Image (cartoon, grey):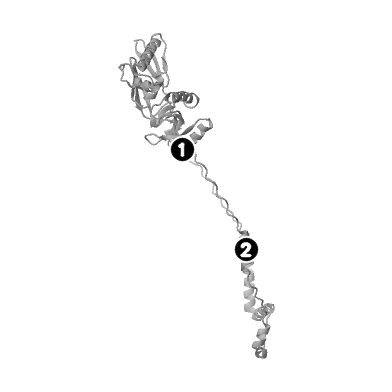
Amino acid sequence: MTGIDRYISELLFHHDCVILPGFGGFITNYSGARIHPIKHNFYPPSRTVVFNANLRTSDGLLIDHISRSENISYQEATQWVNEFTVHCFDLLNSGNSLELKNIGSCRMGKENNIIFDPDLSANYLEDAFGLPSFVSPAIKRETVRQRLEKQLTPRPTAPSEKKNRNLAPVLGWVAGITIPVALAMVLYFTNPSFVDGMGGSYASFVPTVKFSKAEDKSISSADEKSTLPKFRVIPEKVAETAVIIAEQTPEQEPKPEAKAVEVHVLKKYQIVVGAFSSEANASKYVSELKNKDFDAAVVGNSRNGLIRVGINGSDSKSESIIILDQVRAEENPSAWLLRIR
């Protein structure tokens, strides 16, 4: 019987121990973030799977999960699990290895004990979902000898160069200002009449008008009124101005129509493909999935506040499992099924 490993993998996301009756128990242990000292690989925190062959007594967890998922009776689910256990022992006794998808592989040892090799690519820690591992090159540091050589090696001093400033432009400006001023002062003290004559010659350029007292008395008030220019008062055309302003007033622009808000209806079962701490990254991943014709959306937050990105499944558990297999094959092999309550 195949497919039981899929249900074991689903339960390991939410339970610390899942027992396959008659075969053994799969236990998840927390492992913190670690660094490989030689390869310089950085690994995020995770929950790795270990196997215990002594846990063979059924606790009903796996059988009940299969019964609910396949919509069959508890007895039929028990028969499925028993047939799968017999199939596993047949493979191991024949010298073949048993491959459990996203869990690991089992093989029979020399002492007829089951040896389990976990799948290190699977991470069952929900809080660290979507955090990949990466490689950082080693930091090259100077040795003590190199630092001492730098300190003891005398540094060559640059020869001091005297800058020769060109003062010719400055001297030219000073001479152009001081020489005329000095000449003017010499002329003033030696020949003051010449300076007064220069003032009078320059004043002759300004026109002046002289009035006599007789002319001032002869001017009467009537003559003053006649000599003033006559002005014509033109009334303002208020009405025409108001019409022109009204014609030039631009019409009110039509208000843009409100766009309809798209409402995304979530199905009962969602396929989670990513978890992000930034809302912008989550929205960007949703857009990428939509470009790939997936019905993607944000499906809530995890316990520690990470924003989950999911693909719309179905209200039926069986149909959602089929969609989950498709998403694992095409988009993310670590995708898992979430039930919206």
Residue named by callout 1: 150
Q: CA distance from mark 1 to mark 2?
A: 87 Å
Q: Is residue 330 above or below residue 232?
A: above
Question: What's the amino acid at mark 2?
Answer: Val
Left or right of 340: which side holds 202? right
Q: Could you tell me residue 9's position as x and y percent?
A: 39, 23
User: Secondary structure under badge 1?
Assistant: helix
Front one among 164 and 259: 259
Q: Which mark is residue 186?
A: none
Residue named by callout 2: 243
Counting other residues with Cα less than 10 Å from the Cα at mark 2, is it few (<14), some (14-19), or many (20 or more)?
Answer: few
Residue plotted at (61% across, 64% down):
242
Q: Which of disc 2 and disc 1 is earlier in sequence?
A: 1
Q: Could you tell me residue 67's position as x and y percent?
A: 37, 20
Residue plotted at (61% across, 62% down):
245
Q: Which quarter of the rendering shows the N terminus?
A: top left
Question: What's the amino acid at mark 1?
Answer: Lys
Of discs 1 and 2, which sits in the foreground? 2
- Can residue 45 be seen here? no
Q: Residue lying furthest top in this view?
A: 94
Q: Could you tell me residue 238's position as x and y percent?
A: 61, 68
Left or right of 113: which side holds 140? right
Asked where in the image residue 209 lies, by quadrant, the reply is: bottom right
Counting other residues with Cα less than 10 Å from the Cα at mark 1, is it few (<14), some (14-19), or many (20 or more)?
Answer: few
Q: Could you tell me residue 106's position as x and y percent?
A: 39, 15
Q: Which quarter of the rendering shows the C terminus?
A: top left
Left or right of 322: which side holds 8? left
Q: Is residue 110 above or below residue 6?
A: above
